[in-house]
Image (cartoon, helix red, strand yellow):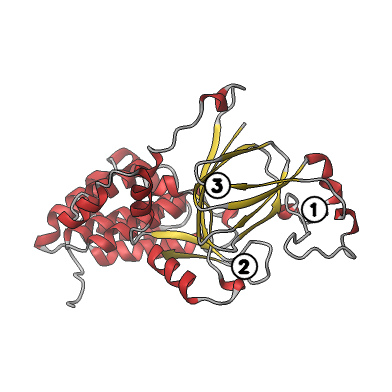
Amino acid sequence: MGEEPGGAAPGLEKAAETAAGLVDEERRAALLRRITEEGGFAYVSSAEKAAGGDLRAAEAAREMAWEQLHSGPWHEVVPAWREAYAMACLHVAELRAGAGERKEALRALDMGLIMGGPLLRRDLDAAVERIAAGKDTEDDAAANVGDCADKWWEGISKNRDLAEVGKNYLCSEWKQELITFSQFLERIQSTNCPANVPYLAQHPLFDQIRELRDDIMIPDYCFAGGGELRSLNAWFGPLGTVTPLHHDPHHNLFAQVVGRKYIRLYPASASENLYPHAESMLSNSSQVDLDNIDYQEFPKVEGLDFIDCVLEEGEMLYIPPKWWHYGLAISCFVLSVSTAGV
């Protein structure tokens, strides 16, 4: 491997022009002004060089923005730095693609889609479509699968970056990571420890891989109350992965795409008997572990009425607002889709 160029190499000139043209000058200038106001002078300098074809500067700008994204709690991250990260990912992707490194280019774009803000989402989507179109004949044949389920498997099994979550968010061993899907599968096959079972939980997969979004039709009755779609998420994990008992503020349609999932529901009226966490961030989650209920610590749970079912492939469950629900994967691989709205 040769050393990465410090300036614009002849082979990267076209990529540099594309990178500079992806974000129109007005939006680009406005974003750089916002970043400057946040003290990002070094970032702006690197971004200017990146737009001229400097790969090192593009990587440096991405690293600076990444550090800002991890400077504190996510909700305190300045929005301009999310946009800055997306811009840097665009620059890196175009320059990597121009150097023939399509896999690295797509990975950079995926990170921009996951961690970046909404301003440049269309630019990121367009770049993904354009760069992915350069795949070889074998990839094209795989992408043209006729069966919808096969297309979904093909889509999520691309070597693309996805958010990964441990067994469940209430466990002490829980953590979040960004890993590729191939790594996700390797962990499923290699781990014997339930605490380390990976789970792709409440992930905005359809923002990241837009081709799959076209296969999801939102039923008309979802809009009967005059509300709007709040979120569309994917849940994917192996046998035994758990979504702990919790409730959500919105109407929820939960569709089972692959595999089988056990679901248990408690009405909103049972809330005080389900021992919600006192912390504000977890107040919609129960302290009760339904896999191992401690009736001495949580005596009110005993005898509570509930509704349960097993969702089979192709079935869908409506969960009303504030209703408590728990999910357990009971087949080797489980893929679910949830739609929330008001």
Badge 2 marks a residue whose secondary structure is loop
Please rate how many residues cluster around mark 3, counting C-alpha atoms within 10 Å: few if below 14, some from 14 to 19, many from 20.
Answer: some
Q: Nearer the viewer, residue 228 or 93?
A: 228
Q: Please, what is the three-letter code of the amino acid marked with disc 3?
A: Glu
Q: Please, what is the three-letter code of the amino acid marked with disc 1?
A: Pro
Residue under label 1, please give it: 276
Please rate how many residues cluster around mark 1, counting C-alpha atoms within 10 Å: few if below 14, some from 14 to 19, many from 20.
Answer: some
Q: Specify the quadrant that holds the C terminus.
A: top right
Marking on residue 312: 3
* Location of residue 138 in the rendering, given as x and y in whole percent from the top left corner: 18, 57
- Marks 1 and 2: CB-CB under 8 Å? no
Residue drawn at the location 28% of the way across and 43% of the way down: 146
The residues tagged by marks 1 and 2 sit, at their Cα atoms, a distance apart of: 19 Å
Badge 3 marks a residue whose secondary structure is loop
* Location of residue 198 in the rendering, given as x and y in whole percent from the top left corner: 53, 66
Q: Please, what is the three-letter code of the amino acid marked with disc 2?
A: Trp
The residues tagged by marks 1 and 3 sit, at their Cα atoms, a distance apart of: 29 Å
**Residue 59 visible in the snapshot:** yes
Task: Report whether 120 appears left or right of 322.
Answer: left
The residues tagged by marks 3 and 2 sit, at their Cα atoms, a distance apart of: 28 Å
Q: Which tag is nearer the camera, tag 1 or tag 3?
A: 3
Residue under label 2, please give it: 174
- Count of labels shown? 3
* Location of residue 184 in the rendering, given as x and y in whole percent from the top left corner: 44, 66
Up/down of 315 relative to 102, above or below:
above
Up/down of 30 relative to 86, above or below:
above
**Residue 45 visible in the snapshot:** no
- Marks 1 and 3: CB-CB under 8 Å? no
Q: Specify the quadrant that holds the N terminus.
A: bottom left
Sequence order check, earlier mark of 3 and 2: 2
Sequence order check, earlier mark of 1 and 3: 1
Badge 1 marks a residue whose secondary structure is loop
